[in-house]
Amino acid sequence: MNEPIYVTKPAMPPLDEYMAELSGIWDSRILTNTGPKHQALEAALCKFFGVPYFYLFTNGHLALEAALQVLNLPRGSEVITTPFTFVSTSAAIARMGLTPVFCDVKDGDGTMNPALIESLITPRTRAIMPVHVYGNLCDTDEIDGIAARHGLKVVYDAAHAFSVTRKADGKSAGVFGDISMFSFHATKVFHTFEGGGLAFSNPEFAAKLAGLRNFGFADGEVAGLGGNGKMSEAHAAMGLCNLRHVGNYIAERRRVFELYTERLSDCPGIKIIAPDADINSNYSYFPIRVDAGRFGKTRDEVCEALAGENIYARKYFYPLTSAMPIYREQSDISATPVAAKLADEVLTLPLYPDLDKADADRICEAVLRSGKR
Ligand code: T4K
C-alpha cells in the first residue's frame, strides 16, 4: 500500500529558524501575556493586512466569539449567516446567546448570496456573519452596503482568507465589515500551531477586545466579563517564522493547484471550484464538485474510493451546519437549496506546499479511476 496522503500537511519553517526564535524566549522567560513575540507578530500582521488593529487569540473560534461579544448585541438577536461552513461559525453565534439565521449561498463560489439577505432581516436582526469560503471573498461591497442601510454589524469569518487580496484595489480580506476573523490553525495556509486573530479598525473595539481576551482586565481592574484568549510566545514565534515563508508556501500551493487543474479540468462530471478571477488567491483548498449523473459515481463513492487507496480527501463542508442536531429544529434545509447541493457534491482534495507531482498524479489518477469502477 502507498503511503497515506491526508487532506493537508502543515507547512513548517526551517527548525533552526524556530529554535532561534525560541532561544529569545529562554533568555527572557516571558512565555505569555502579550510578550515581545506576540507584539511583534501583531505589528507585522497589521502591516500585512493593512489594518490599524490586529489582535491575536489562542484560536480562530475564540476570536470569533470575542468578535461577537464586543458588538454587545442583545441576547437572542438574530445573526444572518451561512450554513455552508465549518461548525465553528454557527457555534460561535449560538454560544454567544444569539440565533443563527441561515442564508443560501452562490452556486459559483459557495459564499453568501447577497441578493437573499434582505428577505431574512427581521426586527431582531443585528448582524451578518458571512464566510470567505476556500479564500474566495464574499461580495463584500454589497454585504457591507446592506448592513449599512439596515444598521447591522458585519463580522467576516475569514478563517480561510489569509493573504487573499482584491485585484482591483489590493485590499486584503482584513479590511471589510466591522471585524474579520482569521484562523491560524495547523491546517491553514499560515499557522501558529493553533491560533487566530481579529482584524479591525474601530479603536473602541481595541480596549474592549484586550479585556475580553484577558479575563476582563482593563488598567489593572476587572472591567468586564472576559475569558483567556491570549496567544503564547511559542505560538507567536511560530507565526513570526511562518510569516517570512508564507509567500513561498502559497507559490507551492499554486503549483499543486495548477497540476490538479491540468489533469481534472476536462473530466466530465468533475467541476473545480476555482479561485474567483478578481482576487489574488491563497490556494487554501482544492475543492471539486462531483456531479454523480455525469461522473457515474457520487461524491461519497469517490471519497471512499480514494480512502481505499490511502488518500484522505475531506467533505468541506458536509453536513451543512443547519442540518446539525443543535440547529435542525430551528432551521429548514430546503430554504438553502444551493448550499445543500454543494454540501452533497463537494470534495476537497489534498493540498499543501510539499505535495509533489508524483503524489498529485496519484491522487488525480485515483479520482479519474473512481468514476470508471
Ligand atoms: N471558521 C471556518 C470557516 C473554519 O474553517 C474554521 C476552522 C474556523 C472558523 C475555526 O478556526 P480555528 O478555531 O480552528 O482556528 C480542520 C481544522 O481543525 C479547522 O481549523 C478548520 N477550520 C477545518 C476546516 O478543518 P478537521 O477536523 O477537519 O481537520 P483535522 O484536524 O482532522 O486535520 C485534517 C488533516 O490534516 C489530518 O487528517 C492530518 C492533517 N494534520 C492535522 C493536524 C491538526 C496534520 O498533518 N497535522 C496536524 O497537526 O478540522
Image (cartoon, rainbow, N blue to C red):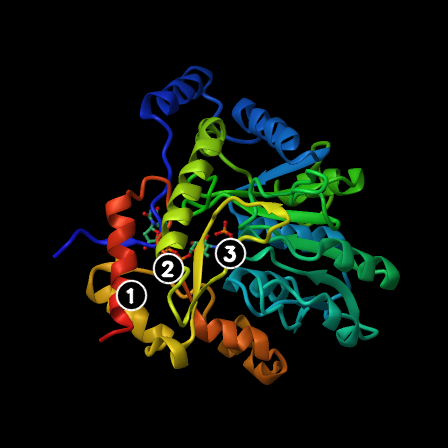
Q: Residue at x 63, y 27 (%)?
A: 43
**In which image quadrant can residue 271 be found?**
bottom left
Point out the image quarter for the N terminus: bottom left
Residue 167 x/y as whole percent: 66, 42
Q: Residue at x 25, y 62 (%)?
A: 366
Whether residue 357 sits left or right of residue 217 in the image: it is: left
Q: Confirm or deny contact between disc 2 and disc 3 (CB under 8 A).
A: no
Between 10 and 214, the residue placed more toward the observer is 10
Q: Residue at x 69, y 32 (%)?
A: 220
- Mark 3 lies on residue: 274
Point out the image quarter for the C terminus: bottom left
| SS label for mark 3 | loop
**Real-space Cα distance between discs 1 and 3?**
19 Å
| SS label for mark 1 | helix
The circle on residue 368 is 1
Whether residue 275 sits left or right of residue 54 in the image: it is: left
Counting residues from the N terminus, which is met first, the one under dot 2 or under dot 1? 2
The circle on residue 264 is 2
Counting residues from the N terminus, which is met first, the one under dot 1 or under dot 3? 3
Between 236 and 102, the residue placed more toward the observer is 102
Residue 57 x/y as whole percent: 56, 42
**Real-space Cα distance between discs 2 and 1?**
8 Å
Disc 1 CB within 8 Å of nearest ligand 1 atom: no
Q: Amino acid at mark 3?
A: Ala
Q: Amino acid at mark 2?
A: Leu
Dot 3, how many residues are within 10 Å of its Cα: few (below 14), some (14-19), or many (20+)?
some
Dot 1, how many residues are within 10 Å of its Cα: few (below 14), some (14-19), or many (20+)?
some
